[in-house]
Structures are given as C-alpha cells and as structure tokens.
Amino acid sequence: MFLNIFQYSFVVRGLEAGIIVAIVAPLIGIFLVLRRYSLIADTLAHVSLAGIAIGLLLGFNPVFSAIITTLAASLGIEKLRNSRRIYGESALALFLSGSLALSIVLLGIAHGFNTNLFNYLFGSIVTVTQMDVWVMLILAVVVICLLALFYRQLVFVSFDEDAAKVNGISTKFMNTLLIFLAAITVSLSIPIVGVLLIAALIVVPVVTALQMRKSFLKTLLYAEIISLVSVISGIAFSFYFNLSTGGTIVLIMLAIFIVTFFSRRK
Amino acid sequence: MSVAHTNNIVEVKNVSFRYRNEDVLKNISLEVHEGDYLGVVGPNGAGKTTLVKIILGLITPTSGSVYLFGEDIKKFKAWSKIGYVPQKATHFDTNFPVTVKEVVAMVRYTKNGHLLSKIKDEDEHIIENALREVEMWEHRNTLIGDLSGGQQQRVFIARALAGQPEIIFFDEPTVGVDKKTQDEFYTLIKQLNQKSHLTVVLISHDIERITEEAMHIACVNKTLVCHTSAKEFFEESESLNILGHKVKVIHHQHN
C-alpha cells in the first residue's frame, strides 16, 4: 500500500515541493522567531494573497506575482518600522489588513472566489506543477546560500543588535536581508500549505525546537527534523485519508509541539 | 575639518540630542584619553546611556560631532578597537539558544562569518583567554540563559575582550548582581585598565563606588555638569549638588 503513493506523479511533485519548503522554512524561521518577528511571516502571507489576486486578475503566474508583491511589501514594512513613527507591530497590522482588503476587492473584480483561490488559501499538492518545483528549488537555493553566507552575522544581530552594530556589522543590511528572505520563503511555500498556514510552517518547528534548550545549530537541526517529519507524514496522511495537505501538516507540527512542550516542562 | 588630538581616543564636540521636542543632551563636549578610566555618573534619565550610544554610533546626534581615534565617527571603520558591554537586563533574551562560547565567538566573525567557516586556532586561543580572564572557561558549553546574572555579565565582558579592543564601554555592569560580584567586577575592570592598559568608560549610578574606582568622573544631567578627576570630584562636595540633590560621598573599604 505504501509504495502506491509514488505511482502518482502529482504526489511525487508534492513531496519534492514539500521537502524543499520543509528545509527552508525553519532556516528563516529561527531568525524570525528569535527576533520577535514571528508575525512578519503571517503578514507577508497575507500580502502574498494580494499578489496572487493581482496575478489571477491580470493573467500572470500567481506565484510570480506573489513573490514580487511580497518582496516590495517586505521593503515597505522595514522602512515603516525604521521610521520609528509607528510601532513595529502596528506596521505589520497595517500591511496585513491592507493587503487582505486589497485581495478581497481585486478578487471581487476577478469574478469572485473560485476553487483555484481555495488552493492558494489552504494549499494543495494536486496543483503543484513541475515548473513550480523548479521555481521553488531555485528560490530555496538562493535563500539557503544567503543565510549560510551571513550566518554568524545574523546570529549576532539577532542576539544583540547594539553590540553587533558596535562591532561593525551593518544591522540595517542584515534586517533587510532577513525580511527579504522571509518574503521569498513565504512565496515559495504557498503551493504546499497555502497562504493561511505558511506562518505555522515557519514558526512552529522552531518554537518546538527551542523547548529542547540546545545550542543554535542543534536547535536548527531539531527544527529541520520536526519540519521534515511533519511535511512528509502530512503529505502521506492527507493522501491516504483524503485530508487537506496544509491543514494535516500544521496539525502534525502542533501535535509535536504539544508533546515536546509538556514533556520538557520543568 | 577639525583634527582631533592624537592622544584622545574619544572626542565629543558640542553634541546635542533632542527626542520628541525635548532636550535629552545639550551641548556636551568631552574627551577620553588613552589609558583613562572614566566614570559617567548622573541621575536616572540624565542621558548617560544616550551619550554612550552616540559615542558608539548607535544613535545619531541632532547636532555636534564625535571623533573616535581621531576620525569622524561617520567615516570610522576600525570598530574592532571598540568593546561594548551593554546593560544586561535590556539586551538579552534568556531563551536564546547560544552557548557561552558561541556568544564570545560572535565578535571574532563580524566580517567573514559563513556557516561553514571553522573557528581558527588563533581565534580559539583568543576566545579561551577571554573566558579564562573572567573565569568562565569551564562554563563554555552552558547555554547563556542557564547562568546567573553575574555570570552572564562576565560572559559579555569576555565577548568584549575577545574583540581585542583598545577601549571598552560598560553600561551599568553591576546592576542586579550581588555585592561580592560587584567587587569582583570592579577588581577585574581595574586590572584591565592598569595591567592590560585598556581605556575604560563606565556608566554607573553608584557615584560613591565609581568615585573610588575611576580616574576621572564625567557628571551628566542633560548637560555636562562637570568633568574632573575622581579625587577632585570626591573632595568638592559642592559639585555633587548638581546632580539634583545633595549627595555625600562616603569613603569605605571594600574587602
């Protein structure tokens, strides 16, 4: 029975895409969580919905339009936060609600909500094309390379921004890089978990791994294992029991979190 | 362009800082000489931390200029000469998953720090020496959040030392630590200043203690109220009125 799963090319594509997302999401997630930027993932996900709406309306590939919109918004959020004229989380709320409002209006113009949109909202491995897998792979390689290249500086900035700056690190560049990479990660995760559940994929494995109280690299390693186990088993479960892929993945992640949280409680 | 005196490590010229239409600092000029041990004192909200943050380039002043090692801070690049031990309580997440050694290693990889870069033998030595200097080497594999407040502060001092700076700024390093640990800190800082010839700038609210420890005292209360030798500061009780209330410095022995 278990071998049957690989007979379907859409499942294989879904697994490929899922593994790519599972590897990348915690890499960016660990920095977002530790910098108290968790909500950025959710905000960017809503922004990407506006991007998808623009794509659907104008007939572009929605994932491409989502990437461009999310990157532009990520720079806008960072600029607004740096202006210090409004609180950081208020900037996120503005972008989150604003982009959701824009999505609703645009989708209304594009003749309402349809099943296609439903796939983007909640994710569906059925709709993942081979082209999607290639685009995701390229974006994932870009994110991984940049994170690896600036790894130690990013850890320093996340731990102690002032001291990092005094030591000559451009914290402005690191913050912009981080939000830029978050935007790419959100966009490439859309086909698997959908806009509404992306934040969970980026945040939950990291929050779970942090409960183990290990060094930075070990925490990252645990987050990767949790993410991969959840995504692969989530795809398999959703296939055999005909469940929503995104929802199943996130529920498995949350189950692991709950078990870890209560077993590690002092 | 004005040229700073070469013996001055820090030169602050007519620096003012306004925040939301209120003066935080007004027209401050100050120098820190090589080998100096300067205590920066003043009441809460007097702008001590703001002044140090301006010197470190973390805050841009509304007006005035800062020179580090004779160079305008806007062009200053030699940040490795500067060490900074921030106020622990406000800068630190105890859940952050880093070991003591990882914290100290941070300052060695500010330029080239990719994931696969192995710690060089030379850096390994520097990190070990810095941790031994503050007696924290045996805790190198402990998570920073699992240490006591005093131990965490030692690690931050080790991190500053591992950068091999010529000047170290301490922002209230003894806040929240017990009396014995405070004494150990002051002994360590004095050693760094006298034996290792490090220039020290230390913000403190503990006027009595810093007057005994430092060579010079800068008294800040929005303006630079006084900048004098610790001895004079101690002797001239009049100067203490400027802090907003009369302070009597009591000289006592520390065991």
Image (tube, helix red, strand yellow):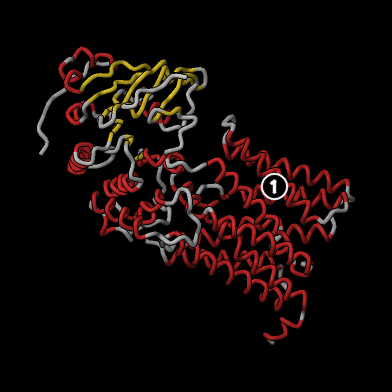
Image location of residue A158, percent across then percent down: 48, 48
Relative to A127, is B144 above or below? above
Left-right relation of A179 to B38: right
Q: Taking the image as drawn, is residue A258 in sight? A: no
Left-right relation of A38 to A49: left
Amino acid under label 1? Leu
Identify the residue position indicated by label 1 in the image. A71
Image location of residue A215, percent across then percent down: 41, 61
Q: For the image shown, how many numbered marks are present on the structure? A: 1
Nearest the eye: B217 or A188:
B217
Relative to B95, is B24 above or below? above
**On what subunit does the disc labeled 1 rest?**
A
Image location of residue A18, percent across then percent down: 67, 68
Image location of residue B14, percent across then percent down: 42, 17
Q: Residue at x 23, y 37 (%)?
A: B193
Nearest the eye: B221 or B16:
B16
Q: Taking the image as drawn, is residue B5 in sight? A: yes
Quadrant of res B5: top left
Label 1: how many Cα within 10 Å (few below 14, some 14–19, many 20+): many
At mark 1, the secondary structure is helix
Figure quadrant of the C terminus of chain A: bottom left
Q: Residue at x 31, y 49 (%)?
A: B155
Q: Residue at x 49, y 31 (%)?
A: B75
Figure quadrant of the N terminus of chain A: bottom right
